[in-house]
Image (tube, coloured by chain):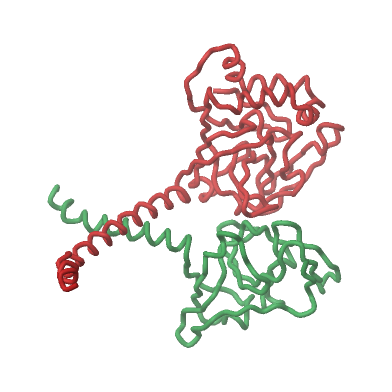
Amino acid sequence: MARALAAVWPLVKGCITGSVLGITVSDSVASVVTMDGASMHPTFDPQQAERALVEKRCLYRYDFSRGDVVVFRSPRDHRELMVKRLIALPGDWIQIPEKQEIRQIPEGHCWVEGDNAALSFDSRSYGPVPMGLLRGRVTHIIWPPQRIGRVGRKIPEGRIMPL
Amino acid sequence: MSGFVRRLAGIPWRSIAGEALSRAFLVAQAYCAVHVVDQHLCSLAIVRGPSMLPAMNLAGDVVAVDRVSARLGRIAPGDVVMMISPEDPRKSVAKRVVGMQGDSVTYLVDPGNSDASKTVVVPQGHVWVQGDNPYASRDSRQFGAVPYGLITGKIFCREVDAISGANILLYGTISWDTSNYQLLNLQKRTVTPLLYAGNTFCWHILEGKYYPSRFSLVSRNQDKTGHHEPPTPG
């Protein structure tokens, strides 16, 4: 019994070390997220299950820019991660064409929208999202190989008046 | 010159480099272990401010935060939670959960000045949080229900330190600081005995008695109407 344990112990120790290192790296440096849903077409293709690299360094000081693609916990269900584009930062005035109104983003919140406006459940439905829910910024697509590339910034024209 | 080069070549660079790398790896492992325990299991934090009087001290309390319960969704009304402030993502605040999604919460709009109350239904995926001290707390009454995803942990244990300057500071604040006194003045008859009960160590220090540190469990209140029974100290 003791000999079996002694034989298995280095393996167990390696697994524990590897998982602790992996969790720390995925929490503080970068992690991978799988895309699901058509709300970000054409930036992400809904037919293929694409994997994207999520950068976490931006969470230290919450320095996000308008037009970044961000990952955040859904305000309707904390277990779900959503990927949308960050359109406006706190203090900006944003024009919502569907409701024909202009709103100011309150302090500590941001406005997120999907690139595919028709199929996207975003801030136009549930309002500004607290920035404390943000979990990272998508910088690259890393799978499948033919889609590898940077995910760039894109700001819709004429809808935001920055502070 | 060649003697110096020969001495340089004689130093066992490879073994030094190997040892340095293994030491650095050990430090990295320790840092990662601390990070994982702090972010995913249990953490310590310092909580300060008047919004959770008398459960928490004005000038600072060390609390233990349980991260597992929040991740698993096992937060119930009456729990004190640590959460990211919806007004500033760089700040963490401690408040008490009064209602979960679907609950209807009744609260006093302006407790110092009027008896008017309002009832709201907490939307899906959100919680309603309030500080125990309704006169000096910025909570869901000002910024609305907060998404559950902002909750980072459940506070389950608080260290009560007899020599904490917080108690002395609080005693001084009530008696001599006129600006804070005005804040508490409105319901002085009810607030002062609550503060007295919550800070019994303060009075014992001033009378010369000494109590060693001990831990007090942060208790759960089931009252949902915005009037809270203060938790008994110790």
Depth order, front residue of B45/B148:
B45
Q: Quadrant of residue A108?
A: bottom right
Residue furthest to the front in view is: B1
The image shows residue B45, relative to residue A11, as above or below, that is above
Q: Quadrant of residue B184?
A: top right
Instruction: Give chain A's shade.
Output: green
The image shows residue B113, relative to residue B148, as above or below, that is above
In the picture, measured across the screen, residue B173 lies left or right of residue B59, that is right
Q: Residue drawn 16% across and 67% down? A: B7
Residue furthest to the bottom in view is: A146
The image shows residue B19, relative to residue B155, as above or below, that is below
Depth order, front residue of B76/A12:
A12
Residue B129: where, in percent of width, then height?
A: 68, 43
Depth order, front residue of A148/B21:
B21
How many tags in the picture?
0
Residue A47: where, in percent of width, then height?
A: 54, 82
Depth order, front residue of A44/A18:
A18
Placement of the C terminus of chain A among the 4 image quadrants? bottom right
Q: Which chain is red?
A: B
In the picture, measured across the screen, residue B16 lies left or right of residue A111, that is left
Residue B132: where, in percent of width, then height?
A: 68, 33
Residue B46: where, in percent of width, then height?
A: 55, 39
